[in-house]
Amino acid sequence: MFVQFLRLEIKSFFRGTSVGVNLAMKIFRFLGILSFIAYCIGAAFLAFFYVREEMEQDPIKIVSRFMILLCVADLVFKYLLQQMSTQNIKPFLTLNIPKKTLVNYTLIKTFLSPFSWMNSFFLVTFAIICLFNGFGFIGIVCWFISLSLLFYLNNFINVLVNNRENVAIALGIVFAIIGGLGYYNIIPLLDYAEKFFYSFYSKPYLVLLPIALFAGLWWICFRYIYKEFYLDQGLEAKKTFGKTENIAFLNKYGAIGSFINNDIKMLRRNKVTKGVLIGSFMFIFYGLLMFTSPIYKTPYMMMLMGLFVTGGFQFLFGQRVPSFDSSYYPLMMTLNVPYKEYLKAKWWLMNIVTAVSILVALFYAIISWEVYFSFFAAGLYNIGVNSQFTLWSGAFTKTQIDLNSKEKVMGQKNSFNLKSLLLLIPKMLLPIAVFGATKYFYGMTPAVMSIAVLGLIGFLFREKIFDIIVKQYKREKYSTLDAFKSKN
């Protein structure tokens, strides 16, 4: 039965009007997976030989010491990028197939995701290197099995917290507190982690503990899914009593105010758009990467970080402008909707959030005023130039977004389009090149002024640019409608 399910998955991939887009995205995803696998294998060699030859320490102990960080990072990435597929299982609930089989297949399918098995290449490679360098066979095998099962436990934790945002936030707060206590040496977190993970090598019989945890969490997840695995429960979106919301003062701005009003209500009500808001807030802390490596303190990287810090909402919301309205976009196109006002409303909303992000990013001045001025310049460029180019690239994004879907916004695919990639040049490369070159030859103040001038030019010519963008949306209108009407 499981083989039959897999055959149906393959058939579904090659059906539908978006097979070309799917195939292109799969190719790029496959190349990304191969690159990550290569990094994992290379990291295994580096971890063993660098620790043994340069640090002159036990490689297993050092790897075990930092394994807790890898486990937490693995759980975070799985929560953000991996979701449990249930929609393609719904049709089988009406057939004469045991529900236990469907539930088990749903759980097994989570292990087929690349996020589940890619990190195994590090463990497999590291374990093989250890075996060829005289480490005990039984100890290495038990250490490898134990760590692999502990990583796979993250799949079950992700299933249990996938649709419980409060639990996920509480768990994140707990991890942050424990991480902070370990970072400031209040508790020796890494020492405890080294003793715990290394014990699976020194005491092989402890492998029974991860096995028991794996079996126990499988049973808990099985019961959790089985209890809600019905057509009218669990798989359906939760319904609440409707209530009327209206931001009255926006109505005096005419059609633009009405569109902004609708977008704000959409951002507040739906799970997918709430994910956009959370992701936009997280982008503000992207600049903290400068503490991880000196390379991030170069002018070019500081400008890149500034574009992300102040433009997170633009990148997550702006380039999906028509997609967020895909459910009623065909109806909207049959009405006398002022296209320019529709796009201007999105533009004003993005710039308002960008302006707020610039103010919030003021805490970077604690690090240095030079850093904040770099981010301030990036914010001005986002307002004057990038906001319009982001809307422009949205004309080529024709992927449906179900606002009631449980799928995470970061896990949803985007339509691959060469034109969208070309628009990255003025969005990213131009400000980085101008800021870096000006700062190198003339200093910080002229660099900020140069980016501000570019932003001012874009702002002054916004009407002309909007006319071009509107024409592009109209040219893409019928292909966009066709894509939004397609169910595959």
Image (cartoon, grey):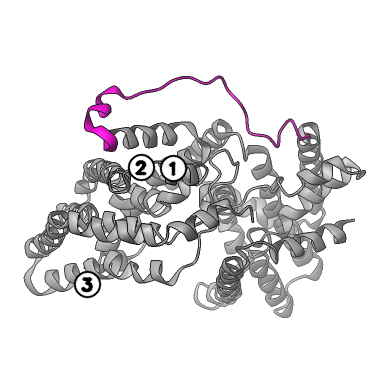
Mark 3 is surrounded, within 10 Å at the Cα level, by few (under 14), some (14 to 19) or many (20 or more) other residues, namely some
On the image, the x and y values in percent for residue 279 come to: 43, 46
- The relative height of residue 398 versus residue 29 in the rendered view (above or below) is above
Q: Are marks 1 and 2 in contact (CB under 8 Å)?
A: yes
Q: What quarter of the picture does the N terminus occupy?
A: bottom right
Count of marks, rendered view: 3
Instruction: Tell me which numbered mark, 3 or 1, is placed earlier along the sequence.
Output: 1
Checking the image for residue 433, the label placed there is 3
Could you tell me the amino acid type at mark 3? Ala
Asked whether, in this view, residue 267 is left or right of residue 42, the answer is left
Residue at x 33% of width, y 59% of height: 392
Checking the image for residue 337, the label placed there is 2
Asked whether, in this view, residue 363 is left or right of residue 239, the answer is left
Is 448 a magenta residue?
Answer: no
Checking the image for residue 332, the label placed there is 1
Q: Which residues are magenta?
A: 230-256
Q: Is any atom of residue 354 visible in this view? A: yes
- Disc 3 versus disc 1: distance between alpha carbons? 40 Å
